[in-house]
């Protein structure tokens, strides 16, 4: 009897262990629809950024209120990775009825833009060849792996809502849908609050009556998605729909739906053509690309000035001029003198910071901004920041410890224009 | 069988006489009331709907299944074992002409019945509150899924009860069991987030397995795997717990 009990216990414990172990292994090994979806997205972006010579991406988005289109946009991006060229055609319809469409072309040495409202071709030519990646893989970014973990944890048990059906030709359809019962209440509440705020904010900015203003009983009604993956595992299209339901102040129920569709087409067969500019109105521009490159910094040598202004008897009165005199500049550093000149009748405003010398190293070679430190006439340290704007032809000159002047009513302006005559 | 029934009745009576059951009922109702108040607050304050009539019971379930239900399962299980070990009242139970296997089974059954009772209570009252205070969003399908979700939650909670019963037989002091259970529970929760690909193996994630029954496509394979994992661990825990209980000297 005793022996029997022991063996029964042994057997049942073993059965339990085996059952647990085998199903656990099967469970870990089984690939959920969510994993397949993730895999397809990763593979597609990887191939698009490394393997395909050319492809076309098509994004479209539509916002509808009870089935009536409020906003829509479409963008077709043709990418030729081999020649680092790309072409963009976009059109949109905004909520106040404005239709916009524009086109752009970009390669290593040029960018060309044109829009429907203005048939002028704006051409930017670069003096140097740009290193322009036509398409970068977002999963190669540093924080991608961490982000993926966070997303996985948030998605949590919703993973099981993704279903994969395989077609005979090897392609797959991945679908998923969540209705209000299936969306966790907390997620629904946070999401609908966010959407409501965003939606209503957008409304009040644009100030148009076509957009309904949701005030009551807002909730996420449905979230749906479907994707097509071809036999090579590359995602051909992905469609997502979200429906937000709510009432406006009159109590009318609105169902706002947002649909987004991304398609990948014409893999390796896309051709990007440079627009033909013959006979078109063209505005040319030589690249002054932000603060990235400054070809001839010597042009900044000289005096720059602005007016010193006070408010007096409800009027602006000029009391003098400030000068930044740049005496020396090269790719690495800049040096000069700051001083202010007051009109004789306003001499009393001349404060301690009326003159100092500065010298500054640019933050990085070929950059145009620098922090400086100088010493004024009374021996105090002065710190500030100088920025040479090629684009505006101005110098921005900020002094950090310039608090003395605010009390006296002096207004400070940090942009200095060149003294040219 | 008659012997088992008598033992079970005995256990149920002991359980019923404890104040804990009353506290459990009051806390469950409190969760429903507070939850409903929060929803009403959100609705009038932020203009959100919060929950509809059927989503409210699901909200309540998602909260209690991770908080007060495991807590009370632990308390009742600890009381049923450690409590009796310490008061030496276990001797009285054992002097009856009932085998230790039947006593152990009767104790576990009583705990399971307690969990079932708590789930039913929560279901009925949250459905009532849901229908009275929220806009109607019920369809037969969603209502059926809601009721079903409550019932399937019994399984992971039973496994939890078995695990705690095992701990109660290993450690002498009830307080030790309680703290070990709470720490293990929290640790598993954290691990489930960190290793989300293995999370379906953890008991704490299995508490949420009712979500699988809400999926439109009804992932039968996944449900089966989860069921077998729980069944396997349940058998192991029961056998191990009983083995120690059987060997114990009082």
Image: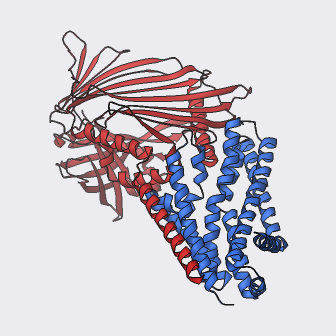
- For the point 20% across and 20% down, which residue is it? A274
Q: Nearer the viewer, residue B5 or B111?
A: B5
Q: Residue at coordinates 66% horizontally, 85% vertically from top-left? A: B173
Task: Determine whether A374 is above or below A117 in the image.
Answer: below
Left or right: B215, with A32 as reference point: right
Q: Position of residue A263 (x, y in %)?
A: 36, 28
Q: Quadrant of the N terminus of chain A?
A: bottom right
Displayed quadrant of residue A222: top right
Q: To which quarter of the image does residue A111 belong?
A: top left
Q: Nearer the viewer, residue A273 or A46?
A: A46
Count of numbered badges drawn on the protein: 0
Q: Indicate the position of residue A262 as horizontal and vertical percent values.
A: 39, 30
Residue at the outermost bottom position = B250
Q: In the rendered image, is residue A249 in sight?
A: yes
Q: Does residue B82 lie above or below B124 as drawn?
A: below
Taking depth in this image into account, of A11 and A322 the one nearest to the observer is: A11
Q: Residue furthest top?
A: A279
Q: How has the structure been colored for display?
A: by chain
Which chain is assigned red?
A: A
Please provide percent x and percent y for residue A50: 22, 40
- Locate residue A207: give its quadrant: top right
Q: Which chain is blue?
A: B
Question: Looking at the image, which residue is at 75% across and 71% down?
Answer: B4
Q: Is residue A95 shown to the viewer in this render?
A: no
Q: Position of residue A386 (x, y in %)?
A: 31, 49
Q: Is residue B235 left or right of residue A415?
A: right
Q: Quadrant of the C terminus of chain A?
A: top left
């Amino acid at each position: 009897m005793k022996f029997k009990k022991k063996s029964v216990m042994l057997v049942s414990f073993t059965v339990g262990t085996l059952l647990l172990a085998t199903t656990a292994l099967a469970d870990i090994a089984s690939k959920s629809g969510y994993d397949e979806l993730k895999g397809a997205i990763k593979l597609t972006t990887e191939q698009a950024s490394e393997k395909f010579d050319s492809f076309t991406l098509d994004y479209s988005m539509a916002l509808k209120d009870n089935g009536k289109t409020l906003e829509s946009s479409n963008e077709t991006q043709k990418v030729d990775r081999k020649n680092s060229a790309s072409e963009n055609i976009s059109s949109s319809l905004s909520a106040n009825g404005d239709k916009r469409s524009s086109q752009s072309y970009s390669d290593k040495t040029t960018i060309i833009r044109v829009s429907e409202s203005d048939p002028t071709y704006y051409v930017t030519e670069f003096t140097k060849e740009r290193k322009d990646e036509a398409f970068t893989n977002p999963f190669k970014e540093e924080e991608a792996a961490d982000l993926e973990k966070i997303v996985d944890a948030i998605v949590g048990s919703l993973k099981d809502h993704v279903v994969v059906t395989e077609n005979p030709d090897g392609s797959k359809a991945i679908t998923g849908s969540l209705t209000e019962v299936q969306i966790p209440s907390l997620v629904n509440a946070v999401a609908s609050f966010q959407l409501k705020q965003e939606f209503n904010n957008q409304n009040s900015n644009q100030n148009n009556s076509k957009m309904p203003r949701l005030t009551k009983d807002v909730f996420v009604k449905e979230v749906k998605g479907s994707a097509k993956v071809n036999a090579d595992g590359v995602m051909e299209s992905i469609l997502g729909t979200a429906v937000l339901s709510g009432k406006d102040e009159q109590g009318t129920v609105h169902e706002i739906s947002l649909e987004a569709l991304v398609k990948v087409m014409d893999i390796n067969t896309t051709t990007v053509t440079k627009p033909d500019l013959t006979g078109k109105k063209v505005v040319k521009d030589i690249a002054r690309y932000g603060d990235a490159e400054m070809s001839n910094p010597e042009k900044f040598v000289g005096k720059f000035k602005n007016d010193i202004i006070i408010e007096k008897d409800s009027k602006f009165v000029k009391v003098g001029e400030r000068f930044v005199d740049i005496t020396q500049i090269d790719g690495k550093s800049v040096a000069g003198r700051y001083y202010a000149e007051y009109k004789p009748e306003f001499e009393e405003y001349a404060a301690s910071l009326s003159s100092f010398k500065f010298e500054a190293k640019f933050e990085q070679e070929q950059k145009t901004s620098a922090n400086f430190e100088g010493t004024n006439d009374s021996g105090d340290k002065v710190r500030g920041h100088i920025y040479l704007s090629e684009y505006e032809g101005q110098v921005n000159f900020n002094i950090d410890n310039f608090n003395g002047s605010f009390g006296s009513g002096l207004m400070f302006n940090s942009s200095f224009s060149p003294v040219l005559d | 069988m008659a012997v088992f029934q008598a033992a079970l009745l005995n256990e149920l009576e002991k359980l019923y006489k404890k104040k804990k059951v009353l506290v459990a009922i009051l806390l469950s109702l409190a969760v429903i009331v507070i939850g409903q108040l929060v929803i009403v607050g959100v609705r009038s304050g932020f203009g959100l709907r919060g929950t509809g009539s059927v989503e409210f019971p699901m909200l309540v379930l998602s909260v209690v299944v991770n908080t007060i239900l495991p807590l009370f399962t632990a308390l009742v299980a600890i009381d049923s074992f450690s409590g009796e070990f310490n008061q030496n009242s276990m001797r009285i139970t054992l002097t009856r002409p009932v085998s230790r296997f039947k006593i152990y089974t009767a104790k576990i059954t009583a705990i399971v019945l307690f969990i079932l009772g708590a789930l039913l209570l929560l279901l009925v009252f949250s459905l009532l509150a849901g229908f009275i205070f929220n806009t109607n969003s019920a369809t037969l399908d969603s209502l059926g899924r809601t009721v079903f979700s409550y019932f399937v939650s019994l399984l992971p909670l039973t496994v939890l009860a078995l695990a705690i019963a095992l701990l109660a037989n290993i450690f002498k002091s009830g307080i030790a069991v309680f703290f070990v259970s709470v720490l293990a529970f929290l640790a598993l929760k954290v691990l489930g987030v960190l290793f989300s690909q293995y999370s379906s193996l953890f008991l704490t994630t299995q508490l949420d397995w009712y979500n699988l029954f809400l999926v439109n496509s009804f992932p039968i394979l996944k449900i089966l795997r989860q069921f077998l994992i729980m069944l396997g661990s349940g058998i192991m825990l029961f056998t191990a717990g009983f083995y120690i209980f059987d060997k114990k000297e009082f």
